[in-house]
Amino acid sequence: MKFYANREEDLKVIAKEFKKLLNDHKVFAFYGEMGVGKTTFISYLAKELGVKEQVNSPTFGYVNQYFSEKFGTIYHFDLYRISDEEEAYDIGIEEYIYDENIVFLEWSENIEKLLPENHVKVVITKTDNEQREIEIEL
């Protein structure tokens, strides 16, 4: 499934569609270059899920925790600085991704072998005309 965003406002519409995936999935692995909009898209998703607090990149602490009245605790990881799977184990990643909470993982390629089978892969790329392509693989 693919979506296209010409402007930031389009991400709100895509987030509404994306929300439908939550019935069957809890772990969402995001891929894309630096600055392509992973955190921005995740912030729209979190708002769509009812998160009221500010959503931003957890770059220096690895994980931010948000709360939604309807969906409970939502974890947002930035794994850019994770250099190997052992480091991911050290921060307790498996406790988060095998829990029942929603987990958004930026830079998932750094822990790909640890991801559960039923995760959703979200690839964000920028096209030649600056459009964002969001491809979702179930």
Image (cartoon, rainbow, N blue to C red):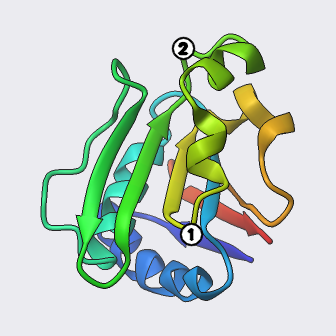
The residue closer to the viewer here, 82 or 89, is 89
Seen in the picture, residue 71 relative to 34 is either above or below; the reply is below
The residue closer to the viewer here, 5 or 46, is 46
Q: Is residue 119 left or right of residue 28?
A: right
Q: Position of residue 57 (x, y in %)?
A: 33, 35
Q: Mark 1 = which residue? A: 4
Q: Mark 2 = which residue? A: 81
**Camera sees residue 32:** no
Q: Residue at x 43, y 27 (%)?
A: 62
Q: Position of residue 116 (x, y in %)?
A: 80, 54
Seen in the picture, residue 44 relative to 124 is either above or below; the reply is below
Q: Is residue 70 left or right of residue 80?
A: left
Q: Position of residue 119 (x, y in %)?
A: 74, 61
How far separated are the C-alphas under marks 1 and 2? 29 Å
- Pick the quarter of the image with the N terminus: bottom right
Q: Position of residue 59 (x, y in %)?
A: 38, 24
- Pick the quarter of the image with the C terminus: bottom right
